[in-house]
Every structure is written in structure tokens, then in C-alpha cells.
Image (cartoon, helix red, strand yellow):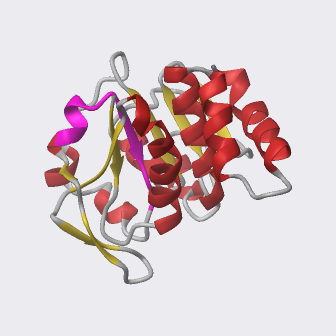
Amino acid sequence: MNIAILTFDGFNELDSFIALGILNRMKHIGWNVQITSPSQYVTSMNDLKIKAHQSLAFAKTADVVLFGSGIYTRDISKDENILKQLKLNPKKQLIGAQCSGTLLLSVLGLLKGLPACTDLTTTPWVIESGVDVLNQAFVAKGNIATAGGCMSSQYLATWVIAKLAGKEAAREAIHYVAPVGEKEESVAHNLSVISPYI
């Protein structure tokens, strides 16, 4: 199972790294989770420079593609050199986006009338792109999911695991990363958020 976490310059660390950490709980069954970027190195919104695992070409063949957010997403949404590399197929791929990543899904024509979730800053831009924005943390229909708010990355990861490996696998992954003393509550909450969309 190949998973691309799209990570661009100015990226929000929480979006990319929370999803990376949770989804890598499935490494034991062969999941291959990769930070996927348009350049070899990308720098976060807080000036953390990381080396990407894969180029954007990886996203075309990945089983799952997750769009993170960042401070330059609005510029990226107008960059034809990047957009033309993102030829995705929601009939064959699970595709999710978080916060400003939802704007990229809209620009790429992947939402097609679906309502979506995003962060408060990006909401006007997503509405301007023709998408109805919901006042909630997560929504999905079929193979497309969107989430709003930095910590909603956990919902995207839970959704991916539940869709592809089952709810018990999702429960185990969230149980592992949840705070001590709050594990059962965290598992129950995460599953309650994503279950209506499985």
C-alpha cells in the first residue's frame, strides 16, 4: 500500500507529520508512507527543512494521496507546473486533504460539487472556488475526504486505515498514539468522527 503525503514549501508540520506517524503504524502489513514533494527539500512554515521521500510523480500511482496544508497553498493552487503533475484518479485512489489542501482538491476538480472541510483561514478561498464549506472537522464521500484544523490530521489517518484495513486496525493505531489515560476515549472519538463515512 503506497501512501503519498503531499508536502510543499511552507507546509504545516502537524498536517504532514501526524498523518505520517499514525499511518506508519501499518508498516508491519507493508504500508509504505512517503512524504511527497515537488523538490528534494521543502521547508515548513516554522523553518524546518526536510528531505522528501518521493517526487510528485509518486502520487500518480499511490493508493492513497493526502494533501497537507501550508502558508503558500494559495500560490501553489495557481502553479500550473505543480498542478499538471497531480493527475489523480478518485476511482482508484483514496484522496484526502486537510485545511488549505482542500483548495488544491477544488482547483484540481476533485470535489465536483461535494461539500468540504477546511480551516478558518482558507474557508473564503475554498468558497470562492465554488465549494460549500461545512462547519465540522471531517467529511468524506466515496474515496474523497477533507478535514479542517491542524489536529484533524488524525481523522484523515483514521479514515484511511479504517477504509483499507478495517476499523479494528484503525482502533489499534489510534490507541497506540493516544495520550495515556485517554486512550479509550480517543479511540471512541476518532471512530465516531469517521464511521459515518466508511
Going 56% across and 48% down the picture, which residue do you hit?
A: 127
Front in this rendered view, residue 125 or 174? 174
Q: Position of residue 88 (x, y in %)?
A: 27, 30
Where, quadrant-wise, is the N terminus in this rendering? top left
Residue 150, relative to residue 189: is it above or below?
Answer: below
Q: Position of residue 79 (x, y in %)?
A: 22, 57
Answer whether residue 8 is visible to the viewer in this image: yes
The image quadrant that residue 173 belongs to is top right
> Taking 122 as reference, is 70 left or right?
left
Q: Which residues are magenta?
A: 58-69
- Count all numbered tags in the image, as a single digit: 0
> Taking 143 as reference, is 107 left or right?
left
Going 44% across and 82% down the picture, which residue do you hit?
A: 46
Going 54% across and 30% down the picture, which residue do you hit?
A: 161
Residue 116, relative to residue 5: is it above or below?
Answer: above
Front in this rendered view, residue 189 or 183? 183
Q: Is residue 53 magenta?
A: no
Going 34% across and 58% down the picture, which residue do you hit?
A: 7
Residue 156, relative to residue 29: is it above or below?
Answer: below
Answer whether residue 116 is visible to the viewer in this image: no
Q: Position of residue 21 (x, y in %)?
A: 49, 53
Where, quadrant-wise, is the C terminus in this rendering? top right
